[in-house]
Amino acid sequence: MKIFILTTDFTAESPPWINIFWPHYNAIRASAPTVLLTTPNGAEEPTFQEKLAERRRRKPDAKRLQATIEAELDPSGPNLLLVWALRRRDIDRATLIEPLWDRFSHKVLTIVDNLQARHTTDHAKGRYDRVTSFCGDLARDYEKTLGIPALHFPPHTDALTFATPGPYRPIDLFLVGRRDMGVWPQIHHHFNAPGRNRLSVDFVSRTRNTRDDSEAEFRGLIGGYGKAKAAFAFDPARLDRFHARSPLTERWVHAWTAGCTVIGSAPTGAGVAEATDWPDSTINLPGTGPEAVEAVEAILADEEGLARRRVRNVAEALRRHDTRHRLARLLDELGIPRTAALEEGLSDLRSRADAIERG
């Protein structure tokens, strides 16, 4: 068997948030023979010149991708194609391998961001065996629009590699990206006031002076989480691009894997409750700044609670939210036997979680 992944590249030229997909790839390639098929990243709103340049690249890109596929196909099969789609462009680019489309025994469209189902019908309908989506409500839309089974795959990461249960936590508070401006400014100013004995980090994964690739950026990101007592994660539903949907996102999984207490506001969308149903998987903050500051102070003062959640959150990430669990479910759904390496990884996840809980 072989797994082929068609995706935007992981180089330093890609946007920094693509670093969340490197651990997916890392866990998949540890579980089965895997071939990464990359296409150049493009601008969110390309100019005419950028569109023209992309059009000129199509022929050499298609030739390169098709040559790789021809050389790597498993003659005994199965050959599984995963098309990772953040934007419509990623689905459109699947046409680059059109001449070899039927050489894959199974084709799966993997929706990893807020790509709306209605925007994908021309290049997706009738072409895939399954759709997976990080968002349960969005998965329902895809199933209805494309007429094929859609699976809700809550966010996941390579928890087996990056689980961080250790007690060394010099950072009190860790924030990455999205924040609730109703409470964050007061929290930020309070915990960063001169003379206050707390360390609060507002993490930026890429600065103007570094151009690391996805692996290096993710290692830096998860390393920061792993040195923090608590991390923030806020319900994304208020953002326009989520179209009022309220899914779990990668921030939660990264924080749990790294042993952080997660504070902020829990999402409420389809499938979220089932994926987060252990005590204090998220501690919801009050809606006003002063009350939120007081709540955070109480969380940080409760060392026993921080230690208890550190252990439980890492164990739950290993048991529920490692990429290997999603891959196993997908193979089962498609009727493809699990590889020995995948079964070994799943066993290691169980053993590691048990060992962490035993202390």
Image: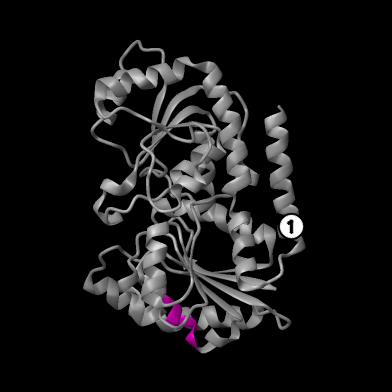
Q: Residue at x 42, y 48 (%)?
A: 248
Task: List x then y, in percent, for residue 301.
Answer: 46, 14
Q: Is residue 290 above or below residue 230?
A: above
Left or right of 168? Residue 341 is right
Q: In this view of the protein, which residue sits in the foreground, 126 or 203?
A: 126
Q: Quadrant of the C terminus?
A: top right
Residue 260, horizontal then vertical, whole percent:
51, 31
Q: Quadrant of residue 119?
A: bottom left
The answer to whether any part of residue 261 appears in the image is yes
On the image, the x and y values in percent for residue 277 come to 51, 40
| Residue at horizontal 53 percent and vertical 29 percent from the top | 227
Where is residue 134 drawn, in percent x and y?
45, 57
Q: Please state which of residues 286 and 239 is positioned toward the viewer in this rendering.
A: 286
The span shown in magenta is 93-98
Q: Looking at the image, which residue sits at the far bottom?
A: 99
Q: Which three-letter amino acid code belongs to the residue tagged 1?
A: Glu
Decide: is 149 above or below 300: below
**Of helix, strand and loop, which mostly describes the magenta segment?**
helix
Check the image and report above or below for 180 versus 85. above
Is 45 above or below relative to 197?
A: below
Q: Residue at x 68, y 57 (%)?
A: 30
Q: Quadrant of residue 331?
A: bottom right
Residue drawn at 64 percent across, 67 percent down: 332
Quick one: SS at disc 1?
Answer: helix
Residue 13 visible, this angle? no
- Residue 291 falls within the magenta-colored stretch: no
Write down the residue under mark 1.
Answer: 343
User: In the picture provided, is 74 more to the left or to the right than 320?
Assistant: right
